[in-house]
Image (cartoon, rainbow, N blue to C red):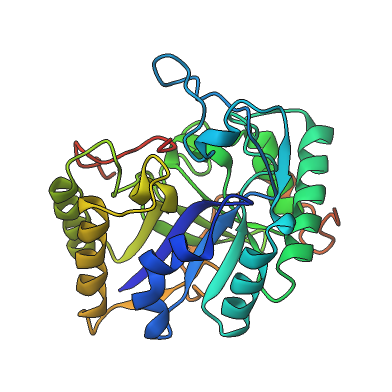
């Protein structure tokens, strides 16, 4: 059995302390995780599917609504911290969009997608030269077929929701908590839910996570680090305690291998493929699970 921990929204606004308080027990055991990092976060992003269209809560209150972008490379403390973790083999950095604007990769604008991937990759490589950068995670976990093809053309693996695959005949059968080696040379992972969310009772979150731990052979645990400090508090509460209990559960499983997307090998071959993405394998561009009722199946914001 394998588990991958994917934490979304590491950005200019992230402090090393916030990550340490969640993941130090794993790092103390030499176990890695994946951080989906935003290259240049926009501070004026509304979550349209929430009542009242609130500002995305991944943005700290003092910055909300400002028409500015904040490159992650400008947080030198965070970059130094994560580069050291990367040198120790404890962190994989994933490209999490570009500015994390609302559903920015549902677009079919080829030039815009290519520009965002090119610039986003450049920013993250400058910020984290010691970290692997081979996996893409779309903001709000939504991505168009056009964007998916271009992501593969750029040489990225993809972790996404099955909602993004249902309109694709070749992959519509793929359920959550799956990992496949694709014919185009890339890897595809699926995960549909955020098991730990500030919108549910922490005990229910823990129960749901434990059920998934017992039922899935590849458990991809999606987190938002900021949820454990909602709304940007310096203190932690019951949700953090539920997470720590679940981490203890993970560490107590001798049959469990905690890995990353980049290191997750021996995946089954998925015979279906996107025709366009298969054409560019050698020359990448430079630039049926029902979720528990309480699980957060959307972007989690």
Residue 168 in sight from this viewpoint: no
Number of residue marks: 0
Which residue occupies the foreground of this view, 69 or 31?
69
| Vertical relation: 209 (above or below) 244 | above
| Vertical relation: 227 (above or below) 144 | below
| Residue name at image x 65 percent, y 44 percent | 97
Q: Is residue 46 left or right of residue 295?
A: right
Q: Is residue 9 left or right of residue 145?
A: left
Q: Which quadrant, please, contains the N terminus? A: bottom left
Location of residue 255 by image quarter: bottom left
* Residue 298 picture location, percent across and down: 40, 35
| Residue name at image x 85 percent, y 61 percent | 283
| Residue name at image x 43 percent, y 35 percent | 301
* Residue 232 picture location, percent across and down: 42, 44
Residue situated furthest top in the rendering? 52
Which residue occupies the foreground of this view, 3 or 199?
199
| Residue name at image x 70 percent, y 64 percent | 76
Location of residue 246 by image quarter: bottom left
* Residue 53 picture location, percent across and down: 48, 18
Residue 11 in sight from this viewpoint: yes
* Residue 178 picture location, percent across and down: 40, 57
Q: Is residue 191 left or right of residue 252?
A: right
| Vertical relation: 132 (above or below) 202 | below
């Amino acid at each position: 059995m394998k588990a991958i921990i994917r934490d979304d929204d590491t950005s200019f606004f992230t402090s090393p302390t916030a990550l340490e308080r969640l993941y130090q027990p794993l790092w103390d055991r030499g176990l890695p995780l994946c951080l989906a990092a935003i290259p240049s976060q926009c501070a004026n992003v509304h979550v349209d599917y929430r009542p009242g269209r609130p500002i995305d809560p991944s943005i700290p209150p003092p910055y909300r609504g400002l028409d500015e972008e904040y490159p992650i490379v400008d947080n030198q403390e965070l970059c130094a911290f994560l580069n050291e973790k990367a040198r120790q083999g404890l962190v994989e950095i994933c490209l999490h969009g570009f500015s994390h604007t609302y559903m920015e990769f549902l677009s079919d604008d080829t030039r815009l997608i290519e520009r965002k991937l090119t610039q986003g990759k450049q920013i993250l490589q400058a910020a984290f030269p010691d970290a692997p950068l081979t996996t893409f995670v779309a903001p709000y976990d939504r991505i168009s077929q056009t964007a998916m093809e271009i992501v593969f053309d750029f040489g990225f693996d993809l972790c996404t929701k099955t909602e993004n695959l249902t309109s694709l005949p070749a992959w519509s059968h793929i359920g959550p908590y799956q990992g496949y080696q694709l014919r185009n040379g890339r890897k595809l992972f699926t995960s549909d839910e955020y098991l730990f969310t500030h919108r549910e009772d922490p005990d229910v979150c823990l129960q749901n996570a434990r059920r998934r731990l017992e039922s899935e052979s590849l458990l991809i645990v999606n987190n938002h680090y900021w949820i454990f400090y909602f709304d940007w508090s310096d203190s932690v509460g019951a949700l953090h305690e539920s997470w720590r209990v679940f981490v203890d559960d993970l560490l107590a499983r001798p049959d469990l291998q905690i890995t990353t997307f980049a290191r997750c090998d021996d995946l089954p071959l998925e015979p279906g493929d996107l025709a366009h993405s298969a054409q560019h394998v050698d020359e990448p561009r430079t630039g049926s699970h029902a979720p528990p009722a309480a699980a957060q199946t959307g972007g989690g914001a």
